[in-house]
Amino acid sequence: MLAAGGTDATAFIELGAIVLGLAVLARIAERAGFSPIPLYLLAGLFFGDGGFHQLDVSEDFLDLTSQIGVVLLLLALGLEYTADELRRTLRSGLRDGAVDLVANALPGLAAGILLGWGGKETLLLAGVTTISSSGVIAKVLADFGRYGNRETPTVLSILVLEDLAMAAYLPLVGVVLAGTSLLAGMVSLAVAISVVVIVLLFAIRSGHVVTRLLASRSDEALLLGLLGSTLLVGGLAEQAGVSAAVGAFLVGIAVSGPVQERASELVQPLRDLFAAIFFLVFALRIDPGDLPPVAFAAIALAVVSAITKFGSAWYSTTRAGIGVRGRTRAATVLISRGEFSIVIAELGTVAGLDPRLAALAAGYVLVLASAGPILTRYADPIGERLQARTLRRA
Amino acid sequence: MAEVQQTDLPGVGVRYEFVTSDGERLGVLVHRSGRRDVLLYRRDDPDECRAVVELAAPDANTLVELLGASRVSEHLGEVQQRIAGLAIEWLRVEPSSRWIDTSLADAQVHTHTGVSIVAIVRDGETIVAPGADDELRAGDTVVAVGTPEGIELLRPALRG
């Protein structure tokens, strides 16, 4: 199962080399103080040629591994927030969320139309440009000691709202990609969305039941129980056309209380491992020939959607009564896109859509996963300049 | 007392802040993990922290002790002096403790440490002389009586 053509030995050697390579990249990123995601993507692009032709490890194995990576990314995301936090944020930040979604989906939509891409590719591209990277942003906030800052609750609530939006967006994409007729599509969309809403309500109201079932003093039992139920729910969700990722996200939300904190710690190393392989495999599959034609589009889209994200974050932080410098810090950090843009683009690859979508998304994330953390380092000087200008005008 | 503002930080914890009588804006960020950050905001930019002091749970207890609870401990000191070799301690049950949601009977506190739990303080209410069926919850404070050595055995078990 593990090895397609060779023996287990060669498969182990290759897998070991791959993971070691990722370890080196993660270390470089840690040293330089930025997210390793762009490096994983670069490595994949460098070694890949649109397939795994030189590798002995079977494609099936890497494929499954990277899909587990997606599931774990969403599980960890769900574990990050309690149902209570979701409910409160949804109530207080609906307007900020709507502004954020509209402002940042538009560049993707426009780019898809300008490039003359099909409807499905365009829909996915809109998702790619909308969702900020909570992984990159959480790291930046911790590294720069910004958790205490008063603009940070606004940043976090925007991330929460985007995550909730994703729980609605992924089933929508699933239905559209299935490519059924309009009527059948509407029906299955309605089914998918109601499944999500029902499970979400259950998770919020009765999460403690799930938590009690999973709770155990042994880390081993907790981890196995959590992974088992996540994969099971994910698989069932996938079968219902809702996408495994959403199922995993909902499981994460349902787990609450003291168990949540522990579960989140237990899942993190697994997520890091599988997600790293996911990013690599995503980039390995991209044909390098597809890159140059979309390079300009990727950079242009990155610039435009950085500006729209800056604008929507500026709007939300202004509404929250944050000063110019705080607004600049929030707006620059939110520019970062990362794991979820890749997760969304991957859906297109799996569905066999135009391969240029994956290439464009990879280029786009390369730019913005690096640009966000770098820009926000200089947020204070930028903010001072903006402040001086507004003062002069006044 | 100054008015304390409370703000949720989804995925991180809760932040409290107030303005001191000196005009400084001071905050405390309670992480879900139990870590506490003491925050001092800048005067020219009230959104940004000038200084952040990270306190692990025991550090926070030490700070609390220094800031306000010293009267309590003086009082306790008297009690302990009166009965030689007896220690009374107020201990917090951390969420990571292995005894969360465990009854006193199941935890076998006395068997393990020789210490008796004489009261449980939960949400501002006190369960005096808890029975074998009473369970420990995260965030409880237990009042433990025993030898100083026994208390030191109990302390890590409640911390987890």
Image (cartoon, coloured by chain):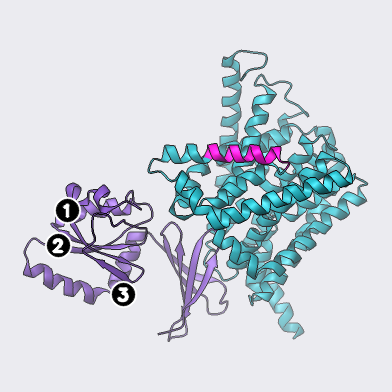
The majority secondary structure of the magenta stretch comes to helix
Number of numbered discs overlaid on the protein picture? 3
Q: Nearer the viewer, residue A361 or A226?
A: A226
Q: Residue at x 62, y 51 (%)?
A: A199
Relative to A18, is B13 above or below? below
> Color used for chain A?
cyan
Q: Which residues are magenta?
A: A227-241
Mark 1 and 2 residues: CB-CB less than 8 Å, in contact? yes
Q: Amino acid at mark 3?
A: Leu
Q: Residue at x 65, y 30 (%)?
A: A64
> Color used for chain B?
purple
Q: Position of residue A66 (x, y in %)?
A: 65, 34
What element does badge 1 sit on? helix
The mark found on residue B67 in the picture is 3
The mark found on residue B150 in the picture is 1
Q: Amino acid at mark 1?
A: Gly
